[in-house]
Structure formats: structure tokens, C-alpha cells
Image: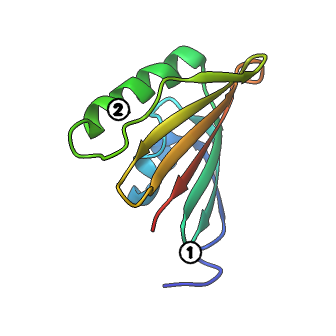
Amino acid sequence: MTGPFRFRNFYYADYSDVSDERFLEGLPPDAKEITIHNSRNGFTASFTIDRDELDAWYDDLLARTDGWIEHPGKAPVEVAPNRFKYGGPRAGNWAGMDIWFNQELRLATVETADW
């Protein structure tokens, strides 16, 4: 199915409300106030989360993708004061994700790309 029912914005109070499996891998279980914009080539999700919860999920994500992913994720880098970029794992065709985090606002954004 394509069109306005699949490619649009979705809103969820927390992770347990998300029922679409395409989004679950790219979201930490501790995510709250989730907004997802779904598109043909992936999705972008914004949500609130504490830094330690985000770090624990990211470490687990890297452990689960170790060995089958061609470009493993990278440690978070501070790109501005209290703002971090997590270079997520990527396949050989560079499909994957990046995570941006504003520590002051406890706001994370996950950008995924499928090819």
C-alpha cells in the first residue's frame, strides 16, 4: 500500500504503543513522545529519552548487528555543546541509521535510510 496512509506522520505516547515492526528496530524501548515521519526510503523518528537509556540501547544495537553489518556504528561524537551524533550501523549499500541527541532537551532524532 502506498499513499497518504502509509507515508505520513505517526504519533505515539511511548514505545509500547508502536505496532509497526518497521519502526521498532530503530527505536529504544524507553522512548516517549514519539513522532515518526515515514517515507519511501526509511523514516525519521523524534522522541524524548534520557542519555543513559539512549546509550544502553545504542550499545545493544551495535552488539546485535556485529558480524553481519559491513559498516559498524561509531561512538557518539559531540558536534556542539550538549549535542551528539551517533553514527549508526550501515549495510554494504549504506542503508542504516544515524542518531542525533540534544542532551539539554533529552530529545533524540533517528534518521534511517533503506535502499
Q: Is residue 114 left or right of residue 101?
A: left
Does the rendering let one see residue 20?
A: no
- Describe the element under mark 2 as helix, strand or loop: helix
* Residue carrying label 1: 6
* Of residues 8 and 102, the one drawn nearer to the viewer in this rendering: 102
Q: Position of residue 100 (x, y in %)?
A: 64, 35
Q: Quadrant of residue 95?
A: bottom left
Q: Nearer the viewer, residue 101 or 11?
A: 101
- Residue topped by disc 2: 62
- Which residue does the image show at 37% across and 37% down from the upper left? 72
Structural crowding at the residue carrying mark 2, measured as other residues with C-alpha within 10 Å and reported as few (<14), some (14–19) or many (≥20) = some
Judge from the rendering whether residue 82 lies leftward or rightward of residue 5; answer left or right. Answer: right
Residue 54 shows up from this direction: yes
Q: Amino acid at mark 2?
A: Leu
Name the secondary structure under disc 1.
loop
Q: Quadrant of the C terminus?
A: bottom left
Q: Position of residue 101 (x, y in %)?
A: 66, 29
- For the point 65% across and 80% down, the residue is 4
User: Quadrant location of residue 3?
Assistant: bottom right
Task: Measure how far apart labels 1 and 2 are at the Cα level.
Answer: 28 Å
